[in-house]
Amino acid sequence: MKKILWLCVIVILGIGVLTYSLLSNSITAQIPAASSYAPAFKDWSIHFSEPMNPETFTNDSVQVFDQRNDTIEVDFDWNEDNTILTVKAPENGYQLDESYRINISERVETTKGDQLSQEFTHVFQAVEDLPKIAGESQLLTLLEERMEKRRQQYDGVVMENAEADTATEESSASGEAGNNAPTSDTNVQVDGIDEGDTIKTDGDYIYFARENDIVIAAAKGKNSTVVSKIDEDHFHTQELYLHKNLLISIGITEKSIRPEKAPNRSLPNADTAIYPPVHAPQTTAYIYDISDKKNPKRVREFTMEGALMASRKMDGFLYLVGNNHPPYHIMSDKQGNKDVEVRPFIKDTAVSEQGEPVDYEDMYFFPESHDERFMLLTSLDLSDMEKEANVETYLGASNQMYMSKNHIYTAVNKYPVSTNNNQNSTAEIAIARPADTKIIQFKIDQEDITYHASTIVKGTLINQFAMDERNETFRVATTKGLAWQEEQPSTNNLYTFDLDLKPLGKVEGLAEGERIYSVRFMDHVAYMVTFKQVDPLFVIDLQDAKNPKVLGKLKIPGFSNYLHPLDDHHVIGFGQHTELRDVEWDDEPQVQQAGLKISVFDVSDPTKPKEKYSEILGQRGSHSEINYNHKSLYKHPEKNLFGFPAQLSETKVIHKGDATYEDMSFVYEGAFLYEITPEKGIELKDTITHQKKDIPHPRWESQIKRMVSVGDILYTFSFEHMKVYNIKEENVIKSVELPDLKRPY
């Protein structure tokens, strides 16, 4: 009996070894992230698990059939190691809305003479470059395909992550100024295009958004007072806009606009079920009539499912860009239960008090994208509160947004597709892969937003300032690769395009092993800051868009996170001071941040830029919002007076026995006011704080968030107070206590 049992075990093990051997030696073909829909001129790349013998690939073994089963004449070619076969699109493209089938015979061979394990087939439908989503069936197919690719390629990070013009050269109108005194505006990227911020002023009143409310204060110098407060339940304000007698508050709302019970439907696949999520982020714009400042009246609500990515206001139109994760989880369910509506919902009280899904007529998809998220582009005409919002929805999200006078540009990271056929391999899991960026251009004509063109650039963008349009040219700066990967060190690049996004020129390979920290495009020049151990400032000539070239560069300690034009020949840099310090655990010195830094760069000779002035604030641990949010910078409308909030720390070396370490302690928190000129440099005019004296740590309620000015009166705001400061006399003339902030917890 035991002999029989052992014999069975041996037979089973033998079958298992044989099966494993056969599977591990199988020759496979696949199209990474293949889609059932493709543009008419799509070239298909088919990846093989082994180098193949091209001589065995003929018009008989590689064929494309149309839906009538007729053969389509196509060409194909190979990569250098014969592992990727590219099947070219027909000369005149595939016929739109027709179905096609790619077939590769199992008789094709590897360089060793082994045959393909089984015939390879892929079926697809030819569609426009930006086709509409035809209906629920197609939408579900697209979503299921993209979710499946995400799971299959987890180790390859196959995704498009939804992770700008000369700025205020100086800003844009936040609202209609009520008096003739010069009034500060939000520091924006493109003159004439407003950006949302937590504070706005019309010259007579100041509107300040806290966490859960909006404070309206009269800007009357020493007679300034709080006039009223706007509260909305279950709403968190992110930014504000002013337009004539309207105040627009944009933020996150918690109450779902979806119906409580979704309609039931049968799914195309009985093994798939779609379930409602627990939470779904929503972006809401509340619009108030503020003709009576004491009694603001809400006149409109627009809500869309999805997180706000960016917003702008120009010529009386508000533009919103949001990213939405479809509310579904695809999983095995033999009973094929219920589903919910996967389209994003919107609510516009100009037409309805109920949330409704986006109409399929307004939904599009990018065939080359693998992203299963929606991007919603919305425009609202602020001159007509009864006019329905225009909402266009695209399957494919965005990371960054830049807006010129005529176009909206969105940028999304595109990661390489894994071709690893070993689904159990974990070698690449959690390893970041260098990404490229797809840039999509939309034309804007008042409320109309229409897709126009797209392109892909090498590398990724630091922020909105990496994009710029002027002189009939689009310019973009990128970092390709990862600074910490020594095998393939990062490089930095600048590309130029015409307004159809056709390539014009490029500069590549700058500052190997570093990454971009800030960019600023001016008229015919770009300033780029990269960093690893020192801060190179590059001056790039863009006079000839077809031949951009580096004119000069400067290397100094530290780096600038934000560049701001001072005049035609000087640029201000706000960032961090750094030092190289020896450490016990490494032979190489380590870069450590050592305080905030302001620099004035003299670029009058672009071939020899120089740091003309610099100022260091605090030591390690000091930080300021200016280093990641340009809107926190205050600029007087007529003077070279700049301000920003900051928190300063200092460090002391402590010796205890054999241990030596640095102790970091709080020094100061408040607003810093500087006069910055090409002639006198960087001069500290004053500091203003809302904190009490002699405290070990700053109170978050007293941290200064923003400052604005009307004439020569400056107003600083924290969540607790508004302080009124006379710029000429350089003193605080009044402190106004703000209403208690309602806590959501």
Image (cartoon, rainbow, N blue to C red):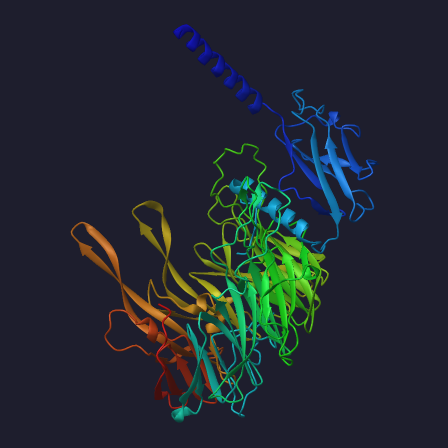
Q: Is residue 234 left or right of residue 137?
A: left
Q: Residue at image x 33%, y 65%?
A: 619
Q: Quadrant of the C terminus?
A: bottom left
Between 582 and 84, which is closer to the camera in this rendering? 84
Q: Quadrant of the N terminus?
A: top left
As displayed, is residue 582 above or below residue 75? below
Residue 541 visible here = no
Q: Residue at image x 52%, y 77%?
A: 186
Between 615 and 679, which is closer to the camera in this rendering? 615
Q: Position of residue 638 (x, y in %)?
A: 52, 85
Quarter of the figure with residue 33? top right
Q: Position of residue 90 (x, y in %)?
A: 80, 42
Between 40 and 144, which is closer to the camera in this rendering? 144
Q: Position of residue 373 (x, y in %)?
A: 58, 54
Q: Is residue 409 left or right of residue 595?
A: right
Q: Residue at image x 71%, y 47%?
A: 38
Q: Position of residue 653 (x, y in %)?
A: 24, 59
Q: Residue at image x 61%, y 51%?
A: 265
As displayed, is residue 536 above or below residue 234? above
